[in-house]
Image (spheres, rainbow, N blue to C red):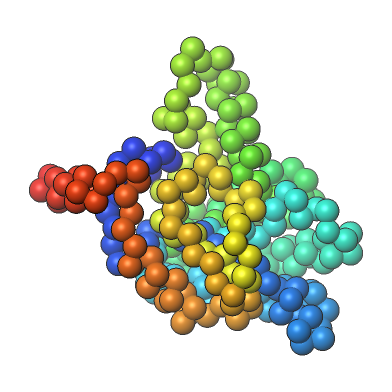
Amino acid sequence: MNHPSSTQEVPAHGDVPRHVAIIMDGNGRWARSRMLPRIAGHRRGLEAVRATVENCAERGIGYLTLFAFSSENWRRPAEEVALLMQLFQSALTQEAERLHRAAVRLRVVGDTRRFGRKIRLLIEQAERLTADNQRLTLTIAANYGGRWDILQALTRLVADKGRPEKLDEAALAPYLAMSYAPEPDLFIRTGGEQRISNFLLWQLAYSELYFTETLWPDFDAQALDQAIASYRGRERRFGRTSEQVAATLATAKRA
């Protein structure tokens, strides 16, 4: 199935978004409020990931993208980074079969060259195991940055085709890290911060943004439903007037 990575047409606005992207913020604060080490918050956050994957699948969401580790997160204390890498490796080991049984396809996007060989191998194995699953595509953005994504796409394009005389969105889109997925309809950030932090800069151009004070370890089915309800009440125009959007969607329905 082909999904354009540039917004040239107004997609159907259903009750449930096709693609949800989430910045999972608040693990450390959740742990601190309970006088626990930060890694305890990250472990509890992994439980929230499991629940959110299932909750999204049950609601008919086709794509879920989670910002697990940004290219800027390497600046965190070395001990915390090491613990996060251990948790990532453990999750890949333990979750691949679970995802496969649930008919979930796993993809990992980002510059994985900085990860250890064991993690890279586990990523390859998990992606291969779940490649044919169609219930939900779960994408983990790891060592990912939106600026990195655009630059690597441009670099690959030039390597493949040389320096094009004319460069447009359609030419660059197939080289983006998430060219296999439609653009996110709904972006969620937990933890109260209201910024996108170099996440999917190209793909979020027309996404509906939803910010919640809920810390990620507390993000449950009710919190997801609140985000979807907010999305459902919005009119997506993509720079057009309401009348133009209505006319475009009416034409699409008749086709």
Q: Quadrant of the N terminus?
A: top left
Left or right of residue 12: residue 28: right
* Residue 70 horizontal/vertical position (percent): 70, 53
Q: Nearer the viewer, residue 165 or 159?
A: 165
Q: Quadrant of the C terminus?
A: top left
Q: Residue furthest bottom?
A: 34
Query: Image point 88% across, 61% down: which residue?
Result: 77
Q: Quadrant of residue 228?
A: bottom left
| Residue 208 visible in the current orientation | yes
* Residue 119 horizontal/vertical position (percent): 73, 55
Query: Image point 66% across, 39% down: which residue?
Result: 148
Q: Nearer the viewer, residue 193 or 34?
A: 193
Query: Image point 63% across, 48% down: which residue?
Result: 198
Q: Residue furthest top?
A: 165
* Residue 98 horizontal/vertical position (percent): 55, 71
* Residue 18 horizontal/vertical position (percent): 37, 59
Q: Quadrant of residue 86?
A: bottom right
Tally the marks.
Answer: 0
Query: Image point 63% across, 32% down: which residue?
Result: 151
Left or right of residue 155: residue 13: left
Say if 218 sits above or below 100 in the image: below
| Residue 95 visible in the current orientation | no
Say if 213 sits above or below 4 in the image: below
